[in-house]
Amino acid sequence: MRGSEPYRQCWCRDPATGKPLRAKCPKLKNKKHGKWYARYDAGGTEGKRRQPVVGPFDTKKECEDELASALARIGGGGSAPDRKLRVAAYLDAYIAGKRNLKPRTMETDSDAFRLYWKPALGHMRLVDVRDHHVSDAITAMELVNRPQPQADKLPQAVSEMLLRMTAARADDERRFLPEGETRHKKSTKPLSPARVGRMFAPFRAAMNAAAPKKIGVSPCDGVELPRARQVKPLAWTAPRETAFREALRKRLREAEATKGKRLTTVEREKVWASPDLRPCPVMVWLPVHCGKFLDSIEGERLFAAFSFTMFSGLRQDEIVGLNWAEVDLDEGVAYVRETGSGNDPKSDAGTRAVPLSAVVAKDLKAWRKAQAAERLAWGPDWPDTGRVFTGSRCLMTAVRALCVPSASGHKNRGLPKTTFPENPWSFAEDRGFEPRRAVKPNRISSAAP
């Protein structure tokens, strides 16, 4: 295998003919004008000779190093990279070939390519992408929906990437929209460091898959991401709850004074849910709060679902996907093997056995009798899904039926704010205590060390 001597050329055009001057440009006398290129023989098929080009490079040494690398790859039995392949085309082919991705992961990865990486680097040839291009794209992502610095302080490459990203995000291409809602900008919030990391992950996987057959090394190697601050949940201890209630009363008085009359229930609940009143974005209940909540919803149709959640700490989708065939109430154990979307649990460790306390087993037995009565009332129209928790119309649609009591009624029950995913995780997974439900007034009355 042979390679040509590196040569320098540019893409200036002849003013008379409009054709590129290449190596004949008179400005090449200036060493800073033009770029370095080289050709090498890569064999061919069906009698057609292939002579791929390496370049452009700023220096002759960079060109010689890349030429030597290409010749070594060909000599070792490798194939020459396709210099016509663009990043956008490669990403489309990559995501189309990921047959084993879960639907949600497929949607997230497709959004990352469509909204960020294809606008930023999609026009480039795959073999030309370097780590500094990836770093510039990440810088542009950090500037999305943020006040822009002065034009002279922002690198031109970053500025152009940011413009293309903004144009791609201008229309929210969700498949389904609520009736009466028009399409709008994807989001007005800046991208958090954690979100930037999630958008970078599928692109890094795609570049790693391209090396070494399509590119020599991944351009994502060595790229530094913004540090993502991990939010650690805090418990609603008595001092925190007291401070929350004092701040809430003060905020309500100020709002009523501004309005000049008493706030409506909806307005008061909006003030109660204000994020700045909580000491941390993720706040979780203590056992006494969980007991008070369960007391307040006793008699609800899906009371057993909340009781099971408080003691088990399962994810929403795991609860929706739980089947009666995986629940042994006599032995007091439930097996998590499937989610509500029909997929396996989130991780291998998610396939597990969950012990059931006597109290939860009793609630589930009562729910099974109520569900059997509903099944008899429906007759042959009942769709037998085998699910433990079903909606009022036999099927549990998403998780809205589980979210309604917890999302809308905390304030009326005298409880501080928490959300479905936050509280069961902290309450059930904390190994420092085991919740125990007692008789009235609190379903969960104490914590045993």
Image: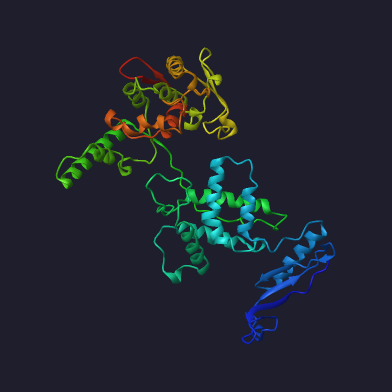
Asked where in the image residue 421 lies, by quadrant, the reply is top left
Q: Residue at x 46, y 34 (%)?
A: 398
Residue at the limit of the structure toward the right, as seen here: 47
Quadrant where the C terminus sits is top left
Where, quadrant-wise, is the N terminus in this rendering? bottom right
Q: Residue at x 14, y 45 (%)?
A: 260
In the picture provided, is 236 more to the left or to the right than 248?
Answer: right
Give left or right: position of 347 versus 317: right
Identity of the residue furthest to the top in this view: 330
The relative height of residue 30 versus residue 42 in the rendered view (above or below) is below
Q: How many numbered badges does the structure rendering display?
A: 0
* 287 over 267 or under it: above or below: above
Is the residue 445 above or below the residue 187 in the image? above
Residue 443 picture location, percent across and down: 36, 19
247 relative to 327 in the view: left or right:
left
From the top left corner, tell me how far across and down residue 127 is, in percent.
67, 62
Point out residue 422 in the picture as x, y percentages from the top left corner. Answer: 42, 34
Q: Residue at x 39, y 38 (%)?
A: 282
The x and y percentages for residue 417 are 33, 35
